[in-house]
Image (cartoon, rainbow, N blue to C red):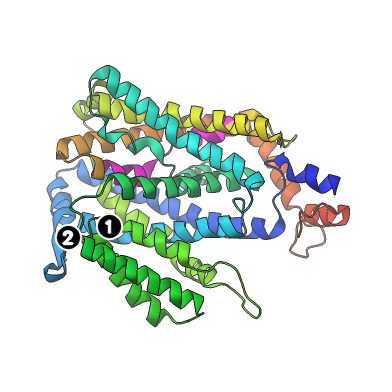
Amino acid sequence: MRDGQRERSVFLGLLPWPERVHMARALRTETVGGLVLLAAAVVALVWANTPWSEAYEDLRDAHFGIPALGLDLSVGHWTADGLLTVFFLVAGIELKRELVVGELRTPATAALPVVAALCGMAIPAGVYLATVGLGGGSAQGWAVPMATDIAFALAVLAVLSTHLPSALRAFLLTLAVVDDLGAILVIALFFTNDLNPVALGGAAAGLIVFYVLQRLRVRGWWWYVPLGLVIWALMYNGGVHATVAGVAMGLILRTTREDGEEASPGERTEYLLRPVSAGVAVPLFALFAAGVSVSGEALGEVFTSPEPLGVVLGLVLGKTVGIFAGTYLAARFTRARLNPDLAWADVFALAVLAGIGFTVALLIGELAFTDPADVEHIKAAVLLGSLIAAAVAALLIKRRNGIYRRLWEAENRDEDADGIPDVYQRAARGGDGAAS
């Protein structure tokens, strides 16, 4: 009993085997999606800074849809309001799973990642507000540097060919899940306009029907896909950002298995939609959101205007200080001890990496500012801040990669070739529950 308690108090220790399997599958998909995301961002930047930039703008601003239903949107808005709903649906499922069976299911295990994530959202916002306050700028972009882009961060790790231990990757994923919840709450509470009570009431009724179908264990995509589209359309017409509908449905989906089930509804939905989210939805959003001018004048605005400067400082400094300080203080007050094979320098490197705030930061930037010129400057700041965070994190992580390689090899060694690493079998024999 004492050994089990002591093992559970280890921060960034060996993950339980079921958690390790789930994390590996999710991170593998997100990593591939992150590489596609990087490619889409590069294409957007190159395209928007060539003689064919007008074609890019014409395609991004082209409208189509169903005007009678209030859904006549530009291509850029379809990707932001439509495709990103899939991204937030997957995020909602992941959050529900974390709350039910993952790291967030008990206060003891949730304390560290939740405190770290909250500090990693509050401090960047504070840095932004301090910067614009000193520079006489606008406070409306305070939420832009709050979110971490897990796919972009994992893509950086993949490009670096690092051997980051699974516990560090899992901690980064959990931080991003809590970040996503914070981002969607900010969007829902602070970036709503022209509320339509009738449409919002219809969306709420649709979510209730969705919940009842789940409670009654009704199966079949033909029930949920049409209902989900109706909820999404009503949420959009209700004046609340339509991505909120995705998170709401994700949180409603059941993520625990019942007798005879090979996978819960949440698991099945996540399995089907995560590749779509990571490989299609987010990259297409990036393609039409990341196309900004990178001229000397535009880059100069990033460092001379308070709003974009606040975004850069929020991502690079605010995220690092917030996540590292929050993690360190939470560990001290919860009496958790850091895995002896790692050092606080590893947590610091992870905090720097979390300063990559690409996808959700771009989305909030578009919502926070109405002037197209301001939006372009904020987007440039997000791109530059994320690039700086990625470069600094790369230096810190590569410096420790020899240690990570040794830990990764020990963590994945399977001498009896039974598909389960030896370290989990030793842990099971030792009775610490890591393989359960």
Label 2 or label 1, whichever comes before in sequence order: 2
User: Is 351 within the magenta?
Assistant: yes
> How many numbered tags mark residues here?
2
Image vertical order of residue 109 relative to residue 126, above or below:
below
Residue occupying the far top of the picture = 134
Q: Crowding near pointer 1: few (<14 within 10 Å), some, many (20+)? A: many
Image check: 24 left or right of 48? right
Q: Quick one: SS at disc 1?
A: helix
Percent position of residue 151, x then y? 45, 49
Q: Amino acid at mark 2?
A: Leu
Percent position of residue 415, x then y? 81, 57
Q: Residue at point 28% right, 35% down? A: 141
Image vertical order of residue 78 relative to residue 175, above or below:
below
Q: Does the image show residue 430?
A: yes
Highlighted magenta segment, given as a residue range: 348-366
The tag on residue 81 is 1
Q: Residue at point 72% right, 47% down? A: 14
Q: Is there CB contact under 8 Å for labels 2 and 1?
A: yes
Q: Quadrant of residue 267?
A: bottom right
Residue occupying the far right of the picture = 429
How far is disc 2 from disc 1 in space, using C-alphas? Answer: 9 Å
The tag on residue 44 is none
For the residue pair 325 and 56, the one nearer the viewer reads as 325
Q: Residue at point 44% right, 42% down? A: 148
Q: Quick one: SS at disc 2?
A: strand
Q: Residue at point 45% right, 56% down? A: 91
Query: Disc 2 designates what residue?
Result: 73
Percent position of residue 180, x then y? 43, 49
Q: Amino acid at mark 1?
A: Asp
